[in-house]
Image: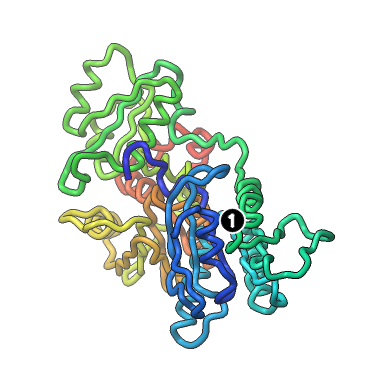
Amino acid sequence: MGLNDTPSSERVHIGFFGRRNAGKSSVVNAVTGQELAVVSDTLGTTTDPVMKAMEILPMGPVVIIDTPGFDDEGALGEQRVKKTKQVLNRADCAVLVTDCTQPQGECEEQLISVFKEKNIPYIIARNKCDLLEKLPTENIPDNEIYISAAEKTGINSLREKIAALTSSGDDTRQLAGDLVNEGDFAVLVVPIDSAAPKGRLILPQQQVIRDLLEASACPLVVKETELKTALSGLSKKPALVITDSQAFGKVNADTPPDIKLTSFSILMARYKGFLDTAVKGVKAIDTLKDGDTVLISEGCTHHRQCGDIGTVKLPNWLKKHTGKDLVIRTTSGRDFPEDLEGIALCIHCGGCMLGGREMMYRMKCAEDQNVPFTNYGTAIAHMHGILKRSLEVFPYLYAQL
């Protein structure tokens, strides 16, 4: 992904669902204008969810997801259905593709029930209307449309319906731009070590820089070893220092107490909507007992380096801080477990690679099972004794500590 590309986490995720051979893949290809999905008359051609980031007018940047038939059968079919349900956890909108020459049945009703249960807006695209003798024109609900993927009938109207359904209006969320004023300096501390991606910055760092520039602030990017020099050389005191959580301890020591300090991970947790939960959940670190299991989850997959934060640094900090013999379980990518039985605490990354719906789903999984849920930056700040300082930029949270 280039620096100018919209990250997948910031794109609207549109899932296409339905029974086998309803024409889902043909509809996906028609909507996208590409041969994105394999089309065949054979039942069950799509065996795994197919995801593709693209630009589609009038929707803009989206991720299109083509799913296996929801009525698949047998042991393999059960796995496909399970994957389909997992897709729903990150879908912002669902398109239920039906064969309008066939009656709507239990499969469609079950999918609609799941859409409603997960509060996912949906459209019913009644495909193969070219095979009907007469096209219905009366009493058609607003969220239904008759289309033909084969003849491209109604495809533009379907796109417009999807766009209307996924329009979020005025999204005023900001990572850091609301924490500074025009002309303010903001110092960003970015360690360059063996785990840093060669030749580029990680996504939260890119996004924070962009957000500060849009706020007409002046971001200054330095390594943790140059922070003192940078602060002493500035013509005026910076409004904010933002650090990678791994360098929290050193950056805290090198940043004067009259300068506000926080981390990329804490900012991302607020942006994704779960910082309040993370602050409440972090207190569970101090109640961990010998034998407790801590789940450390990352939303992305990457090559594990020596000194990796999720598998090495966080477990070491936890054991040192608590003095307890803990069981550490780690997951990455899409492998977040729905069943959290036996988990005493979940520590999640900031979720920069996950859409807002999927991040909130993971948080809700923990809440529903009474499992404390926090994130990397909040946990690291707490274990370094600087959580209160790192939340000073958010007075409403600061007052709760």
**Pointer 1: what residue?**
93
**Residue 137 locus on image (x, y percent):** 81, 59
Please tell me in which quadrant of the rendered image residue 124 appears.
Answer: bottom right
**Residue 122 locus on image (x, y percent):** 65, 59
Please tell me in which quadrant of the rendered image residue 143 appears.
Answer: bottom right
Residue 72 relative to residue 144: left or right:
left
Q: Residues within 10 Å of mark 1 (few under 14, many from 20)?
A: many
At a point 50% along the width and 50% down the height, the residue shown is 356
**Residue 132 locus on image (x, y percent):** 73, 70
Q: Is residue 282 visible?
A: no
Front residue (pair 353, 6) = 6
Tell me the amino acid under the disc marked 1: Cys
Which residue reaches farthest bottom?
74
What colour scheme governs how the chains and residues are painted in the rendered image of this protein? Answer: rainbow
At a point 25% along the width and 36% down the height, the residue shown is 190
- Eyeballing the image, is 357 above or below 366? above
